[in-house]
Image: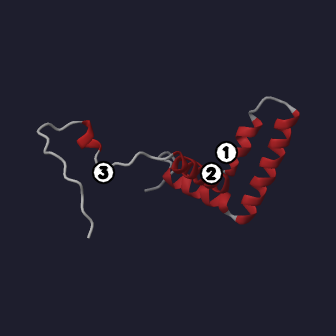
Amino acid sequence: METRPSHPPRTELGTEELEAGMRPSRARDVVTISLIAVTMLALFNSAALVSWTQQLPSTATNAWLAERAGAWHTLMQRLGTAQLFARVKERLDPETSRW
């Protein structure tokens, strides 16, 4: 049987009471969420990745990145994820959607 420490009753509602039960987010959680978001964008919005790399300053490294982004986008088109994103985006766009 688990026992909880007893705390004296408080009369005013303060910051500690408002934050009770809320755990601070760990940096590990932020990294995990960021990796999931980047992966989803790379899989389903590869066209934006190509567009972004084409806007980078002209250097050998950026040209290499643009080539890799283009190859990735081609692969995503073959797998169908790029088209899926385009269809979802078209349906959600208020100017082109037919509700």
Quarter-of-image position of residue 76: bottom right
Say which residue appears at 11% left-offset and 39% top-offset: 11
Give me the disc on residue 21.
Answer: 3
Q: Number of callouts in the render?
A: 3
Of callouts 1 and 2, the N-terminal one: 2
Image coords of residue 73 (percent x, y): 75, 53
- Can you identify the residue that label 2 sits on? 41
Tell me the element at label 3: loop
Give me the disc on residue 6.
Answer: none
Along the line of sight, which residue is nearer the eye, 20 or 74?
20
- Can you identify the residue that label 1 sits on? 48
Say which residue appears at 53% left-offset and 45% top-offset: 27
Q: Which residue occupies the extreme right position in the image?
A: 60
Along the line of sight, which residue is nearer the eye, 88 or 12?
12
86 displayed left or right of 54:
left
Say which residue appears at 67% left-offset and 45% top-offset: 48
40 displayed left or right of 69:
left
